[in-house]
């Protein structure tokens, strides 16, 4: 059975559910709730004499049984034929709701209409109707082939539709409380005020929808249906109040409430599915900022701060640290911009990078070149004048390694990964020297940790984007291994080396026992994950990338905290 047939079947289930709600309304409005004293049978029979209130209560039970059977079939169809996992669970949840509804129905009979159970039973029935109707929407051609419409007021429509649906549900709860005996004055006033609020919100939705031609064409009819149902619901409520509880008016009021909630829920889902906010036009400043690779730069600055804090004895000089981070940010951002300038042809071939400013044509190559060179020079000068000569020299060396060695080598040899790891590990050394400390074994240990961390991290990234690298023409390690066995073994080996290197700070007095204990445990987790990837031939390499980032942040935070 294809989705079209499931869609039609779900509409049938929704129709049967609506009949069940009408039957339940007749039971309540005629006072037939306790006409049958037992459950699930009626006077011990499947077909009792249909006289008095029994005919309303037993008819309600029979329809409920049919709805439960239909929902079971719908769940099975979704589990067997539906590809979307979340929708399969939606079907399972619908059947679970039917079972809960049946249980609540039994409680209302056996315990003589307890208020909580009766109100929950009434509201769950109306919610279930919307639930099944949503399944019919999710399986429709409209939902599957939806093309989002851009609207500056998309968020407004979505939020107001959510608010309207919530208020309608609150209104139904208040109505159920009043219908089951809670007729206090404040309850009636709340019911009236909520109805007024719903009416106002729907009018605003209708008016706003009519103001945009594209939105009007797609949503006006659905919004008008909701507005009509709200108006009808209010009219029936007034009629039921004036008519002093006439059975048909009260039942129609309750049934229309279910239709109103359903219409509001479906309209809300359509707004979220079919409307989207236009992508804001990014200014040129934003594109230049994008050239600096902000996320990569922030990670480098975190390691720079680590080196600075670990090299400082006593109170950390915040002004000097600020100058260090600013200078390193300019140099790092400039290096990344120059890297993108040199690889703009390669970036255009890869799906992951084709949206960058240069391959997408948002910036021209000359502007990127001038920008990258300018901020790099400013950054070096900033470090030279406001930190020290050694740090500025290291910045020049890092820039040269990254731009003049690593970037060209990516087109020639897979060994580029090791050169890139050198450039990526130097910021922690720059932080060390910026604090005024000379190079030595402690700075070398920090460098080694950062160098070894990058190797399994970038191997995992290269494997995740292996298809992109195949198109690019770059010489990456991932292209030398088709099955992922060799790269997996390398990741395990580098994690072992990282384990040993990351424990060295405690052995040379750079950190204490707290750092040793936490990092020993963290290394165990990272190594275990690498081994699992090796066994499974890197099938879940994508999970290793955030795990390795969390590991590095743990090293940084714990090392600083242990020192402080």
Image (cartoon, rainbow, N blue to C red):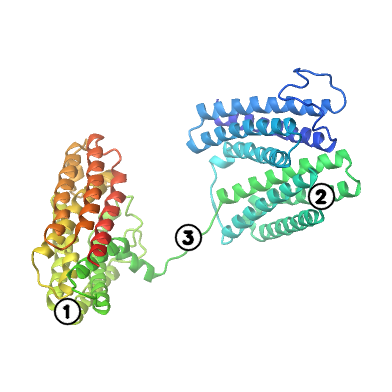
Most foreground residue, 389 or 176: 176
Left or right, 71 with respect to 520, comes to: right
Residue 16 on image: x %, y %: 71, 30
* Label 2, label 1: how far apart the Cα atoms are: 80 Å
Q: Looking at the image, which residue is at 60% across and 31% down? A: 95
Using the image, tell me which numbered label, if any, was put on residue 384.
1
The quadrant of the rendering that contains the C terminus is: bottom left
Is the Cβ of the residue at disc 2 closer than 8 Å to that at disc 1? Answer: no
Position of 538 relative to 344 (above/below):
above
Position of 455 relative to 318 (above/below):
above
Q: Looking at the image, which residue is at 54% across and 50% down? A: 148
Q: How crowded is mark 3: few (under 14 residues within 10 Å), some or many (20 or more)?
A: few
> Does residue 472 appear in this view?
no
The quadrant of the rendering that contains the N terminus is: top right
* Label 3, label 2: how far apart the Cα atoms are: 50 Å
Secondary structure of the residue carrying numbered label 3: loop
Residue 107 on image: x %, y %: 70, 32
Choose the circle earlier in sequence order: 1 or 3: 3
Secondary structure of the residue carrying numbered label 2: loop
Quadrant position of residue 263: top right
Left or right, 10 with respect to 529, comes to: right
Residue identifier under label 3: 279
Name the front one of labels 2 and 1. Answer: 2
Name the front one of labels 3 and 2. Answer: 2
Residue 457 on image: x %, y %: 23, 50
Name the front one of labels 1 and 3. Answer: 1
Position of 115 relative to 401 (above/below):
above
Choose the circle earlier in sequence order: 2 or 1: 2
Residue identifier under label 2: 183
Residue 89 on image: x %, y %: 52, 35
């Amino acid at each position: 059975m294809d989705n079209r047939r499931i869609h039609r079947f779900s509409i049938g289930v929704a129709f049967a559910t609506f009949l069940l709600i009408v039957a339940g309304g007749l039971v309540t409005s005629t006072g037939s709730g306790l006409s049958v004293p037992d459950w699930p049978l009626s006077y011990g029979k499947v077909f009792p004499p249909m006289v008095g209130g029994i005919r309303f209560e037993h008819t309600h039970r029979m329809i409920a049984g049919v709805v439960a059977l239909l929902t079971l079939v719908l769940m099975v169809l979704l589990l067997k034929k539906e590809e979307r996992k979340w929708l399969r669970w939606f079907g399972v949840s619908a059947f679970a709701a039917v079972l809960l509804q049946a249980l609540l129905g039994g409680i209302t009979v056996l315990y003589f209409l307890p208020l909580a159970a009766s109100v929950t039973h009434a509201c769950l029935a109306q919610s279930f109707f919307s639930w099944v109707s949503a399944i019919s929407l999710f399986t429709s051609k409209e939902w599957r082939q939806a093309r989002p419409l851009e609207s500056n007021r998309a968020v407004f429509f979505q939020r107001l539709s959510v608010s309207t649906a919530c208020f309608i549900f609150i209104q139904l709860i208040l109505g159920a409380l009043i219908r089951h005996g809670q007729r206090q004055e404040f309850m009636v006033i709340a019911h009236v005020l909520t109805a007024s609020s719903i009416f106002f919100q729907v009018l605003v939705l209708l008016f706003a929808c009519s103001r945009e031609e594209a939105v009007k064409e797609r949503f006006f009819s659905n919004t008008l249906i909701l507005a009509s149902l709200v108006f009808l619901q209010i009219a029936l409520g007034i009629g039921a109040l004036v008519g002093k509880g006439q059975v048909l008016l009260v039942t129609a009021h309750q049934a229309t409430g279910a239709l109103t909630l359903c219409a509001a829920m479906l309209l809300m889902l359509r707004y979220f599915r079919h409307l989207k906010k236009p992508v804001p036009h990014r200014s040129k400043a934003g594109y230049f900022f994008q050239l600096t690779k902000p996320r990569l730069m922030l990670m480098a600055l975190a390691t720079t701060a680590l080196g600075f804090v670990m090299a400082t004895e006593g109170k950390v000089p915040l002004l000097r640290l600020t100058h260090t981070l600013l200078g390193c940010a300019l140099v790092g951002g400039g290096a990344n911009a120059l890297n993108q300038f040199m690889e703009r042809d390669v970036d255009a071939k890869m799906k992951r990078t084709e949206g960058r400013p240069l391959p997408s044509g948002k910036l021209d190559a000359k502007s990127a070149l001038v920008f990258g060179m300018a901020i790099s020079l400013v950054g070096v000068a900033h470090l030279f004048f406001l930190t020290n000569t050694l740090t500025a020299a290291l910045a020049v060396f890092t820039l040269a390694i990254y731009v003049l060695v690593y970037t060209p080598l990516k087109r020639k040899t897979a060994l580029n990964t090791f050169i890139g790891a050198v450039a990526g590990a130097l910021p922690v050394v720059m932080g060390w020297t910026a604090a005024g400390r000379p190079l030595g074994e402690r700075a070398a240990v920090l460098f080694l940790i950062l160098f070894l961390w990058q190797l399994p991290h970038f191997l995992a990234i290269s494997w995740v984007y292996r298809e992109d690298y195949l198109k690019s023409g770059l010489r990456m390690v991932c292209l030398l291994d088709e099955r992922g066995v060799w790269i997996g073994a390398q990741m395990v080996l580098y994690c072992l080396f990282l384990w040993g290197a990351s424990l060295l700070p405690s052995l040379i007095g750079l950190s204490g026992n707290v750092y040793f204990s936490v990092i020993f445990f963290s290394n165990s987790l990272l190594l275990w994950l690498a081994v699992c990837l090796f066994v499974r031939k890197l099938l879940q390499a994508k999970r290793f990338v955030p795990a390795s980032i969390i590991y590095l942040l743990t090293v940084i935070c714990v090392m600083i905290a242990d020192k402080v």
